[in-house]
Image (cartoon, helix red, strand yellow):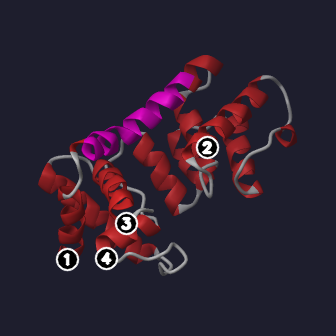
Amino acid sequence: MTQFVRNILRVYRKATEQELREGKAWYETALDECDIMSRRYGVPVHIVVGVVAALSPSNRWERNLKDAESMINAYVSGQYMDEVSVATYGAMKAKAWDILSRSPDEDEVVSILNGPKIVDFYRCIMGEDTCVIDGHAWCIAHNERRSMQEVPSIGKAARKELQDAYVRAGKRVGIPAYEVQAITWVAWRRMHNV
């Protein structure tokens, strides 16, 4: 794990001032976007964040937000789930609708999401000191540039080890793990033109 922390911090230290600002603000800005939708539609912010997280797989961020707003608008307007088109999997759309229709508390949202990556995404937006371990986070920690198809499957033990490494890296620089993850992703994207 020590090597993972070193690799993460190596990328972190290569971040430009702009990348530091962008990465540090990423999840806070995401929560602000969810808060705007929360106030606009009268839906609790943790529900909005749950919908966003559910609709996130294979969905670009800008489209993710549009899809979440479309689903929330449809729900509060009394429409049906099938009347909304989203750019993710049908099972994820059903989870988002389930979150809206059940109006669960935060723990129940996590239970409905029930997938490590989307649960972590939810928790990061909500401000918890964790991070999303995806193929990019794996590459950064391993200091290996691979296509997402070349990244090995990240099991439970590997995910925990990598999350712990990002938390430790964050403690070394005095910021939450999700900010380290976002900053290193922004820097990695520039460094490797991905």
Precedes in sequence: disc 2 or disc 3: 2
Side (left or right) of 76 relative to 191: right
Q: Nearer the viewer, residue 155 or 4?
A: 4
Circles 1 and 4: CB atoms closer than 8 Å? no
- Residue 3: mark: 1
- Residue 176: mark: none
Precedes in sequence: disc 4 or disc 2: 2
Above-or-below relation of 13 to 144: above
Question: Dot 4 corresponds to which residue?
Answer: 142
Above-or-below relation of 186 to 71: below
- Please, what is the three-letter code of the amino acid marked with disc 4? His
Nearer to us: label 4 or label 3 = 3
Question: Dot 2 corresponds to which residue?
Answer: 64
Side (left or right) of 159 relative to 103: left
Precedes in sequence: disc 2 or disc 1: 1
Mark 1, other Cα within 10 Å: few <14 / some 14–19 / many ≥20: few
- Please, what is the three-letter code of the amino acid marked with disc 3? His
Circles 2 and 1: CB atoms closer than 8 Å? no
Label 3 element class: helix
Q: Nearer the viewer, residue 139 or 110?
A: 139
